[in-house]
Image (cartoon, rainbow, N blue to C red):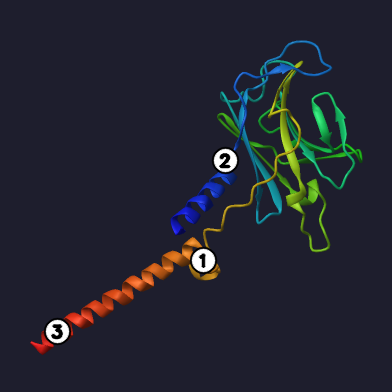
Amino acid sequence: MTHRVAGIALALLASLTLAAADPRGDAVPCLGAHGGGNPPDLVAAVGRASEEGSSATWRLTFAHPLRVPDPTDPPFRVDVVIRDPKVPVVSFGDYRDFNRIVRFDATGGNARLELLFIAEGGHTLFDPPVIDGDTMTIRMPGRLLLGADEFGRAAMQRLRWSVVVRDGGRCDLLGDGSPTHRLVGAPPSSTATPAQAPVEAGSPVSAVATIAIVVVVVGAVAVAAFALVRRRR
């Protein structure tokens, strides 16, 4: 039973770390648009609550290395489409039930991210994404995305997201483009020690610890018994 529980736990943990996959070569005409285009082929994306849950980080993977600045005009665009359930949503074209966009236009390597507040109006700029070959990493503070409470914390768990990559009149959507993906939790800190992490009774970790203690005790008893037998001889 212990091995079964451990296997289920590992499977659940693995599912949280997997990126959302997207088919290759699935670009289609953008709804309500005309003309051609060749958007970068998005093949996977993962969104994570980073910096102890105070920021959102998206890592997007494409089928080929990105060319930035885009040598063709207009340059391609990457939109992380966001829904905050506490704000009214809108829909148009390929963008459904959303109220925020984190946007990158491939006009240059230092082009900054733009956060668009759709329902409220307005926008703000933030640091450029990090582009490394076929990957793009986008980071945005939660206080900008969702606002913050009186303690300066943002409720990142309520955020839902998707991705739309666009070039001219063609779009590559993550899935159907609807912002339904959650941010996965931040990875555990490397500075944490076993003593800092409480272990519940019956968990796989506590079971392993119990087995180790039993082995040590049995070994000690066996050594004592062997010594007693030799002494009697």
Q: Position of residue 134 (x, y in %)?
A: 57, 29
What residue does disc 3 label? 229
Query: Where residue 220 appears, x then y in whole percent?
Result: 27, 78
| Residue under pointer 1 | 202
Horizontal arrangement in the rendering, residue 131 relative to residue 114 (left or right): left
Q: Is residue 214 above or below residue 99?
A: below
Q: Which mark is residue 100?
A: none
Q: Is residue 47 left or right of residue 79?
A: left
Residue at 79% from the left image edge and 51% from the top image edge? 143
Q: On the rendered image, what quadrant is the C terminus found in? A: bottom left
Nearer to us in this view, 136 or 62: 62
Point out the residue furthest to the right here: 120
Query: Which residue type does callout 1 highlight?
Result: Gly
Local packing at callout 1 (Cα closer than 10 Å; few below 14, some 14-19, many 20+) is few
Q: Earlier in the sequence, mark 1 or mark 2?
A: 2
Quarter residue 66 falls in: top right
Q: Kindly identify which residue carries mark 2.
A: 18
